[in-house]
Each structure stands twice: as structure tokens, then as C-alpha cells.
Image: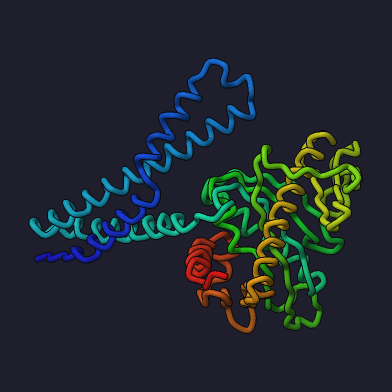
Amino acid sequence: MIELDFSEQIAALRATFDDIRSVIDIDRLRTDIADLSEQAGAPDLWDDSEHAQKVTSELSHRQSDLARLVSIESRLDDLEVLVGLANAEGDQESADEASTELAGLQKVLGQLEVQTLLNGEFDERPAVVTIRSGAGGVDAADFAEMLLRMYLRWAEQHNYPVQVLDVGYAEEAGIKSATFQVDSPYAFGTLSVEAGTHRLVRMSPFNSAGKRQTSFAAVEVVPLIEQTESIEIPDTDIRVDVFRSSGPGGQSVNTTDSAVRITHLPTGTVVSCQNEKSQIQNRAAAMRVLQSRLLLLQREQEAATKKELAGVITASWGDQMRSYVLAPYQMVKDLRTNYETNNPSQVFDGDLDPFIAAGIRWRKQAPKD
């Protein structure tokens, strides 16, 4: 005889779901969908293609959010029915299905609960991520490329649109730097916990002696700002250089000088873009990334000033936020949250959600300034 008792687990899931519903505000979500649907139905919508894409994208995301909430509520109801059926008929297949569905709902609600913690000023925005190799020579450049693949695989698994804006290849192997854009709601809030210095320890494939090598790479994450929020940058504050796009080994992949590098002279901030086909498009994309970085820099300076005036010095996230160890043992550990796993290959293949969720919860619980 089968006696499943998931009453406590289901009650906990319903409590979590109620909390999520109160934060997301389903009534407001439905109102937004109605308003966006009306805008999407306007006959002149596509007269402004950029505005039209924004409206249709926001409508799609909000409809997806509502459908997910409705689906979860329905699955919770079905789970209770399934448990009752398994107990009443002693059906092992139903019992196994109920156990699987319980685990699935716990995972889905856990992920959704994390999203409700993303309520910062820019958390809803798409993200621009830059990876730079640090100390460690060729190993560091190779590590930077491993991180790039890791984040692209993570985005692919979530069906998030990604645009690689620029890649600077190293001479021997790997990359010096790479910048890519993730166009998804809450991409910045989600990926912002990945910002910091990442450390790799392994037996170097580039060292003939096979010695253990430690290398570093830096990850920067900034929100993509709206066009209307663009910071005014005087032409006298920037230097624009054009060059030919290139691939690994310096092989030319473009026969015109379409790639653009913009240097913001007052801060020394440099942005490159070679993804688009024309110089005009690359310059526009690079300027938008530059404005995003300067906006975040401005916010950070304001926050630093507030800290100084308040006379409070608190620990920052630190230079080294995560270690990836491949030798002499296998482990990836986040040094802020202490979350760890002994499967680095899975992490490098894009399995970042547990680290990101732990980081978001850690940041929410950290003492405020």
C-alpha cells in the first residue's frame, strides 16, 4: 500500500507561490498586458520599428510571466490530485510521477522566488558583459575564453538572445577580452552577481613541464540603458578609432575598416565593437555600451560618496569572488556565498543557476550601507 504524504511540502510551495504573487502583482501584470496589446494592435505601430520591437518584446515577456504563474497554480492543484490518486489506488506509477512533479515545482518556484529579489534600479534591464584576461599569461587568456563560452552556453540554455559585440583574440590561445549583450528582462540583475575576479587553478596545457598554474579573469556587468537615458558625451571627450575586424590569428574577416573603438578620455574607458557590418552601426552600438558603463560608473561614484560621508567602511565583494579548481581536485566554489560543486565541467558548460541564485540571495541579505 502506498501512503504519500506531501502535505507539508505542498503547503510550503503554496506559501512561496503566494509570496511571489504578491510581489509580482498579477493584477498589474494583466493591466500591462492589456495596455501593451492595445499598443501592439495600433495600425501605425511599425512606423517606428525600434518602438514596435520594444512593445512586442515587452508584451511577449509579460504574457510569458502570466502564463508561468497560471501554469504553476494549475500544477500545484494537479499535484494534490495526483497524490490523492496514488494513495487511493496504490498506484506506484502515479506516486513516482507525483514525486517527480514535486521536485520540478520546487525548482521552478525556487527560480521564480529568486527573480522577485531583483528589484534594484537597473535589475530589469538587459546586460552588457565584458570578460578580460588577467594575471596568468596564456592560461589567463584561455580561461577568459572558457568563461565566455560558459556564459554563452548559460544564455543558450535559457533561450536568451545574445549578441557578441567584440572579441579581442590573444596571440597564442584564448582571448584578451570579449563583450557581449544579453537581451532579456532581468539579465542585468541576474548576471550582476557574476561581476568580479574569477580564479582558475589547473595543470597548465601550455606548460611543457605540466606544472599547476593559477590564472585570473575579470568579469564586468553593466545594464543596457534606454536610449532616452543616454548620458551626454561631448565629442571632445572621446577619441574614435576605426580598424578592420579580425578573427583568431589575425585573419581578416572584413575587407573594410568597419570596426570601431571609442575611448572616453576623462575616464579612460574603452569600448570596441566589430559585430555589425557597417562602421556607423558599430559606432552606434559602441556608444550605447559606453553610455551604459559611464552611467553605472556615475552611480558607483555617488554610492562611494555616500559611504564616505556616512563614515562607514564595509567589505566589498572582493577581488576574488569564485575559484575554479581542476587540479589537484575538482571543485568550483563561490567565496561570498560558500556555495560549491565538485563538477567544474558542468559549470563550464553553463550550469550557473545555483551559483547565481545563491549570489542573489546573498546580496539581498548583505548589510545595507
Identify the residue at image location x=68%, y=77%: 202
Is residue 268 found left or right of 213 in the rendered image? right
Position of residue 332 measured from the top left corner of the image (x, y, whole percent): 57, 74
Vertical side of 317 occupied by 37: above or below: above
Please state the total of marks drawn on the protein image.
0
As drawn, which residue projects farthest toward the front? Answer: 309
Q: Nearer the viewer, residue 315 or 278?
A: 315
The coloring applied to the image is: rainbow
Position of residue 354 measured from the top left corner of the image (x, y, whole percent): 48, 65
Res. 109 in view: yes
Identify the residue at image location x=48%, y=35%: 60
Tell me where residue 319 sits by quadrant: bottom right
Is residue 227 found left or right of 135 in the rendered image? left
Is residue 342 found left or right of 82 in the rendered image? right
Identify the residue at image location x=82%, y=56%: 269
Identify the residue at image location x=57%, y=70%: 369
Position of residue 246 measured from the top left corner of the image (x, y, whole percent): 85, 47
Tell me where residue 104 sits by quadrant: bottom left
Quarter of the picture containing the N terminus is bottom left
Position of residue 232 measured from the top left corner of the image (x, y, whole percent): 78, 43
Res. 243 in view: no
As drawn, which residue projects farthest toward the top? Answer: 43
Vertical side of 336 occupied by 248: above or below: above
